[in-house]
Image (cartoon, coloured by chain):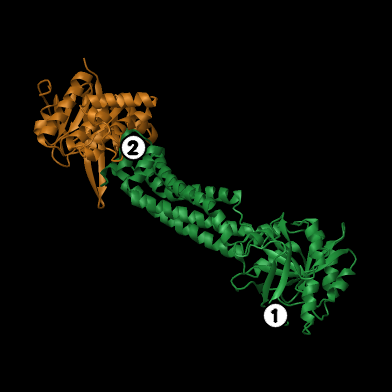
Chain colours: A green, B orange
Amino acid sequence: MLKLAWRNLIAHPIRSILTSASVCIAILLLCLLRSIVTTLDAGIEAASATRLIVMSSISLFVDMPVSYQQRIEQVDGVDVIGKWQWFGGYYQNPRNFFAQFAVDPEHLFDMYPECQLDEEAKQRFLSTRNGCIIGRKLADDPNFAWKVGDKIPLVGALFPHPDGGAWEFEVCGVYTSSAANFDERTMMFQWKFFEETLRTSGQDPGVGVFVFRCEPGANVERIMGEVTAMFENGPMSVRCAPESEFQRMFISMMGDIPMLLGWIGTAVFVALLLGCVNTMLMAGREQVRDIGIYKALGFDDVTAFRVLVTQSLLLCVIGGAAGIGLTLALKPGIAAAIAAMFPVFIVADETLIFAAVLIVLLGLAAGIVPAWRASRMKPIEALRAEH
Amino acid sequence: MTNAMIRVKNVTKSYSRGGETLKVLNGLNLEMDEGRFYALMGPSGSGKTTLLNLVGGLDHPDSGDLFVAGANLSDLDGAELARWRADNVGFVFQGFNLIPVLSARENVELPLSLTGLSRAERKKHAEYALELVGLKDRMNHRPKQLSGGQEQRVAIARALATDPKVLLADEPTGDLDRKSAEQVLDLLVRLNQEFKKTILMVTHDPHAADRAQSIVHLEKGELGRIEHNAPAAAK
């Protein structure tokens, strides 16, 4: 049966290759789309349940007063708190984009145990006024190739340096991350240095987000409610949410990506299905007389059905397997290409299993109509068909 | 003493074409003995091919009974009829009807896959059948690499590969030149004489019909005269 299906496929090599290639490309696309969703979700899943984020209720791009920190700290159950501000600078050229944050370094490593840095580097970071730490991937980026002790001049696009030049940071350590939510392409520097530098020109920097950790056993729902209520009457109302919720909001700023990717994936699948059905209908029409011969020789209707379904499955499995193989082969390249946006690129086992199931369903769906017709055909009618 | 291999009792068959009903077989009664070679002749539309298809279990009669190789075909459903065809009948068609993507040996092996034979046994049987029709040296050729006469001989090898009781041939020499036609007819005569196959051959060609032991004439769906030739012989 398999040999017969294979021979029928290679009897029309161009058609079979084109159809299999379209299955290959579509499966590659579907795997990549699902992997992007998985990658986005990875940050949410890895987010801490005890870390809470406070941001302006208007937008992530609207700052909050620094004074909020003390008031949040006073809420019963709040353990430690830190400020984060998006710096938005660039190194030499705006194309050299990577994330930079002004942070409170004192509790950074307590609050983010996934950010791993040796003790010596931590102390150096805490004691160096313009010190910064950078992630391993950023340090290894051949565009930068920074190491401890290097000076990094950054042009402040959002916060220009008061003297009109570049901000200069000194690399005190290179951290690694043990979780998907903590990016290794980020730079963090001292809030104090950031604030003091801006104040020399009379600027008073605001805070992008406050991150705080609750005490063990604290009622997180109550704390979120109290923090939100505390600033309800201004001057800037806030929104307090668990880190996972914040990650989700951050992703949704780009639109409903999973839904959009889902629709694209569905459209690709439907287009692919139509293409495969068309190919198999042509194959079915061409093989009507062969079906008549099988039946005359004593093969039953089920065999006639199987001949065409096997052919359809083979066509889709060859293309689909190539698509899965291509996904795995391209994974490192894609991960490197999107490294500036996503710290990891995850092709989950579930995605590959999903693709394999889809390939089988596609093969069955594409072959079922011609196979059903073939099985229902009377041998006499089939034998009369022209080749 | 011979037994009837094929018994046709009051068989009628009609077709609808363009809203009109065409009666092709009209209460036909006929008996054919085991181990004989019959030619079925008659003008176009007399019901020759229809009768051949009914005897081969490829179609059902509207009424009447067909007993072939000990089975009443009217009692068999689609799957049973398929099984019965595999065990009892070999077909040879005018247009050869080989599977184009398979080699000569694979074509002959095809009906053997319905038997319980192992792959090696199937291969051996197929090679023997091809040797019998003089085409062992062409067994790896695809149908399009063979001449018409060779294709028809492969089709005959396929038809006899499962050792059926009955061989049904529909204009087996219709698409062949004279020389190839003679080779095919010689082969059919040999299968009848050496292997005692019951053969029913539809033909328009009186020369081909002469090679059979009996010539059955059909006229407007009814039985005409039956002629008996001298014992068939490979010429």
Residue at the spot 73% in from the left edge and 59% down from the top edge = A47
Disc 2 is placed on an element classified as helix
Label for residue A131? none
User: From the viewer's perspective, is residue A359 above or below residue A271?
Assistant: above
Q: Is residue A299 above or below residue A76?
A: above
Give neighbour class at mark 1: few <14, some 14-19, many 20+ (Cα, 10 Å). some
Query: Which class describes the residues within 10 Å of circle 2: few (<14), some (14-19), or many (20+)?
Result: many
The outermost residue toward the bottom is: A202
Residue B168 seen from this side: no
- Picture quarter containing residue B142? top left
Q: Residue at x 22, y 30 (%)?
A: B29
The chain ID associated with circle 1 is A
Residue type at the position of mark 1: Pro
Residue, disc 2? A295
Q: Which residue is mark 1?
A: A160
- Closer-to-camera residue (A352/B35): A352
The answer to which image quadrant residue A73 occupies is bottom right
Q: Nearer the viewer, residue B180 or A297?
A: B180
Residue A319: image x %, image y %? 45, 49
Q: What quarter of the picture does the N terminus of chain B occupy?
A: top left
- Work out whether residue A210 can be spotted: yes
x then y, percent, for residue A12: 33, 48
- Chain letter of disc 2 in the image: A
Whether residue A137 sits left or right of residue A288 in the image: it is right
Tell me how many marks there are: 2
Q: Name the quarter where the C terminus of chain B is drawn.
A: top left
Tell which of B128 and A251 is nearer to you: A251
Q: How far apart are the alpha carbons under marks 1 and 2?
A: 82 Å
Q: Residue furthest front?
A: A149
